[in-house]
């Protein structure tokens, strides 16, 4: 072997050794983090049912429970789908459609996708020709928990 080739070979070997050491440390760090991750949700003490991550809250009856609020205010509301409510009969009754998030509802309004709708949180309220007292009750129920 020539004298010039030996230092080049050593540098390559050292680079590979450092790269392997870095990979080993990365693998060790990732393995150590694995103990902190909880894959299964915790079941409350004394509960006979298993906890599940597979349930999605309905925007109609989540924590704010818009549907219950409207029924308590004696608003004639019917559930048409998991994201749609009808107040009274069309064409005079108001329609409420829930977007995925308040930002998605605002985006739909800004781009002109939902012309004529009022955005209240994640709800899009199409008033049509609903009477003012009914709209006031609907707006008050939809505004529960809305910030800003």
Image (spheres, rainbow, N blue to C red):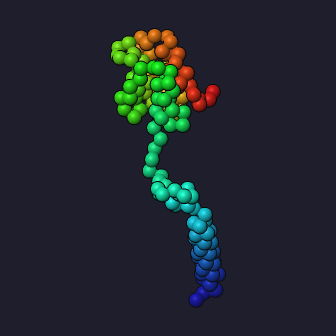
Q: Residue furthest bottom?
A: 1
Res. 110 visible in picture: no
Q: Nearer the viewer, residue 24 or 140?
A: 140
Give the vertical position of 148 relative to 52 (above or below). above
Give the vertical position of 54 relative to 80 (above or below). below
Where is residue 129? Give x, y as percent.
42, 11
Q: Nearer the viewer, residue 112 or 64?
A: 64
Q: Nearer the viewer, residue 146 or 51?
A: 51
Give the vertical position of 8 relative to 71 (above or below). below
Which residue sits at x=51%, y=32%?
65
Which residue sits at x=47%, y=41%?
57
Give the vertical position of 63 relative to 46 (above or below). above
Which residue sits at x=44%, y=16%?
127
Res. 94 visible in picture: yes
Where is residue 137? Give x, y as percent.
52, 18
Q: Tell me the quarter of the image containing the C terminus.
A: top right
Q: Would you say 58 lies left or right of 38 here?
A: left
Where is residue 74? Give x, y as percent.
47, 20
Which residue sits at x=51%, y=60%?
40
Q: Tell me the quarter of the image containing the N terminus.
A: bottom right
Where is residue 5? Give x, y as percent.
60, 82
Q: Quadrant of residue 64?
A: top right
């Amino acid at each position: 072997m020539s004298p010039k080739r030996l230092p080049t070979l050593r540098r390559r070997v050292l680079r590979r050794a450092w790269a392997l050491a870095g990979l080993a440390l990365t693998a060790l760090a990732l393995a150590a983090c694995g103990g902190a991750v909880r894959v299964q949700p915790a079941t409350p003490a004394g509960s006979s049912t298993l906890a599940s991550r597979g349930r999605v809250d309905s925007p109609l009856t989540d924590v704010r429970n818009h549907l219950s609020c409207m029924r308590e205010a004696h608003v004639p509301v019917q559930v048409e789908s998991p994201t749609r409510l009808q107040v009274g009969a069309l064409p005079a009754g108001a329609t409420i459609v829930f977007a995925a998030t308040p930002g998605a509802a605002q985006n739909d309004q800004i781009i002109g996708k939902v012309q004529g709708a009022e955005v209240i949180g994640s709800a899009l309220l199409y008033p049509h020709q609903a009477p003012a007292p009914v709209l006031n009750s609907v707006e008050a129920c939809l505004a529960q928990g809305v910030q800003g």
